[in-house]
Image (cartoon, rainbow, N blue to C red):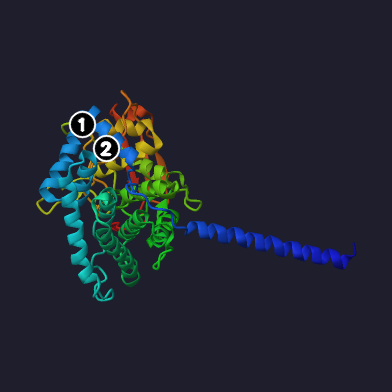
Amino acid sequence: MNRNTLHWKIVWGAMLFVLMAMGTVAVAQEAAGKKVAVRHPNLLLNQEEIEQVKNKVRENPWAARLLERVKAAAEKDEAALETALSYVLTGETKYAVSLRKRLIREAREQMAHYEKLDVKAEPEWGRWSWWGATAWAYDLGYDAFTAEERTEVEQWLRTAARTIIAQEKVLTTTPNLVFCEHWRVGMIGYCLGEPEFIEWGLRDPGVHGPSRGGFYPVMDTMIRDEQFWAEAPIYALHYDVHGMFALAEAALRYDGTDLFQYVSPKSGASLKKLVDGYLRMAFPLERTGPKGGSIRLATFGDGSTGCSITGRLEDTFLDESFMAVLELAYKRFHDEGYAWVLSLDPDREAYIHRGRPAFSYVALTHGERLPEKPQPPPAPGGLYDSMGFAVIRSDESPDYWTAGGLAAVLRLGTSVGHGHED
């Protein structure tokens, strides 16, 4: 073989490799945007799981009490999600009728405004509604709607999602609130099988920067020291972590995408580490309240320790928002330490009160049986220089939570969003 022939074989070989690689990328890109056949119900519970919830209600008094609370909200307030849950868990047609009336009424009223909406003039209109809960309510009650009604509701949801995407281009806000937009649009995408909305919820690079983007860019840019949201701790706790878990639950059911196991190659962040980060900032158990006690959170910046306008001291605890997320985290990670924290409330009543969540009583729909005597988690301290604080504990074993040891969290001055620079 002469040198010239060898040269051209190498060239053609290289070109063939490039073409094959391009084909692989194209296939991957096509798969990423591929439309999956939509099933209902499937967004956050499928039919098999709904039957499991019914069994849970029959076997557990605490679950039966939660269902009664859900039914009360449906009958008193006509809350869409609670009405849908009441329908699928009881089969009573009155809830189906109520859900249909509410969603059709809202769709028609709001579409009348959407049709004449100037996004530049009204960049906030409809932007912060309960779209995650609405999408799940529609998914649960899908069989209660006629084909024509489904067309109306789905047009409304698609219009809302496209409008939010357009509004974010015109006017942005803080990262925690911008991610609220992304996970809700993603939920609409998973409900309706719309790759455009799923892609925006997961991968949008952010018109105003990646910290204001979808799930993957946010995990890359907004998490410090692998486990802390880069704003005052209370913000992600009340607005974003439950949204991340909602998105992850929906993704897993839709096409098997497992965000629960995802670890950012840039920040090292994962959903489990975010949950563990809040436990890392917790003080020992306080024997307060009517149940198993309360856990105070060391926090800083807006929304943390302070006085209300009435002069009452307010502090931040691992509250219902966190306990609700922990129900989801225990379902996916089965960490015994999570079970111990959940066992502090034997009634499992956690309800997310902020951030317009996609969930109702999480333990009812997603909570699992806890061990009889779960052991507390370990309590390691650490220096978190990217976030700007240190956790110092006299006891880092599981005994930390109940043995009365000393703990301190020291701020070192690194700036965070929603912080107080004084």
Q: Is residue 361 visible?
A: yes
Which residue is labeled 1 in the image?
A: 62
Image position, residue 61 (x, y; %):
20, 29
Residue 200, image quadrant: bottom left
Left-right relation of 401 to 102: right
Q: Which residue is mark 2?
A: 363
Q: Quadrant of the N terminus?
A: bottom right
Mark 1: secondary structure = helix
Q: Could you tell which of marks 2 and 1 lies nearer the N-terminus?
A: 1
Query: What crowding class fits label 2: few (fewer than 14 Cα within 10 Å), some (14-19), or many (20 or more)?
Result: many
Give the image location of residue 114, x and y in percent: 24, 70
**Quadrant showing the C terminus:** bottom left
Q: Please provide percent x and percent y for residue 188.
A: 33, 57
Q: Residue at x 29, y 47 (%)?
A: 299
Q: Name the residue: 28% across, 40% down.
A: 365
Q: Secondary structure at mark 2?
A: helix
* Residue 275 sits in quarter: top left
Q: Work out whether residue 138 or residue 186 is closer to the camera in this orientation and state it.
A: 138
**Mark seen at residue 17:** none
On the question of residue 394 being in view, the answer is: no
Please give the name of the residue rendered at 20% of the width and 31% of the height, measured from the top-left corner. Answer: 62
Q: Residue furthest top?
A: 372
Q: Find residue 102 and report its horizontal and vertical position in percent.
A: 17, 56
